[in-house]
Amino acid sequence: ILLPVIGYPVLAFFLIANGVVMMRRESRSLGNLLSLLTGLGMLLWPLVPLAIGLLDLPDGVLIVLGSLATLIGGLGAYAGLCFMIFLSAAVAYRKIPGGFPVQHVIVLGSGLIGDRVPPLLAARLDAGIAAADAQHPPAVLIPSGGKGSDETIAEGVAMARYLSERGVDESRIVVEDQARNTRENLELSRALLPDPGLPVAVVTNSYHVFRTALLTRDLGMRARVVGARTASYFVPSAFIREFVAVMRENWRFHLPVVALWSVLVVAFTATAFVA
């Protein structure tokens, strides 16, 4: 009984604290501010009904505001339910033991700093080397990523250079340098395989594992996704961003629920006006 009561404000303050850390250590992009904005929203939302009740407004306006609060609250509850399912499935996927032998390891790219591999991407590459070297014989590495507008070279090229500097023989590196997003990382890397049906390992950061696994399933790939260690302060905001991306990619599934709830709230509002 006490867990939801205690957990809600604890989670809200945790997200706010994480958002402050993100602002200090990372760029102030919308994606990096997600944990802060979510925490502030959670903290302030319970005050909305109280604020509406204190306002000296006509009954009609109060009904509309109350209905709007009900609409947003219901959609928030649905999003919370989806997030708990997403979180549970993501944790369960990471805990599945075992795997299967592979001849190729795809390492997904992320942003460069000019032509330099930053720590986040370096963690992926180091995990990719470990995954490839664990195979018998050692697997081929496919660093994947195109050139962004703020990058001087393609991510795949910079990643290949990093792998070579870490002692990986060039005969074990096949560069993919055209991909613009995760789906293209997977599709274009698969096209470089001797046989598109071969099983592969895919390496990304820990927070990105489950969405990548969903994409490999959608593409019909036999793949096992491996997560590289990520700085703990970065995970909450990044995981929220992953959740938003999955919800957006599956909007057709969620649209009927949103539409049904909206119709019910509008009908209730109309009935209140008639009464």
Image: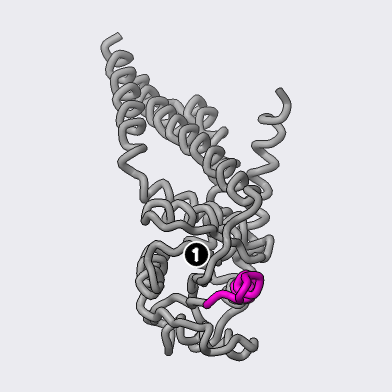
Residue 76: image location, x then y, percent? 47, 36
Q: Is residue 163 visible?
A: yes
Residue type for callout 1: Val
Residue toward you, 256 or 192: 192
Residue 155: image location, x then y, percent? 46, 81
Residue 121: image location, x then y, percent? 57, 75
**Badge 1, how many Cα within 10 Å: few under 14, some, many 20+?**
many
Could you tell me which residue is drawn at 67 percent across and 47 percent down? 13
Residue toward you, 243 or 131: 131
Q: Is residue 134 magenta?
A: yes
Disc 1 element: strand
Determine which residue is flagged by label 1: 200
Q: Is residue 191 left or right of residue 173?
A: left
Q: Is residue 25 visible?
A: no
Could you tell me which residue is drawn at 54 percent across and 66 percent down? 102
Q: Quadrant of the N terminus?
A: top right
Q: Is residue 3 magenta?
A: no
Could you tell me which residue is drawn at 46 percent across and 86 percent down? 157
Residue toward you, 65 or 94: 94
Colour mapping used in the image: one colour
Image quadrant in which you'd find residue 180: bottom left
Residue 147: image location, x then y, percent? 39, 81
Q: Quadrant of the C terminus?
A: top left
Residue toward you, 22 or 219: 219
Could you tell me which residue is drawn at 63 percent across and 52 percent down? 16
Q: Is residue 79 above or below residue 146?
A: above
Q: Is residue 112 above or below residue 51?
A: below
Q: Magenta stretch: give its range.
A: 126-140
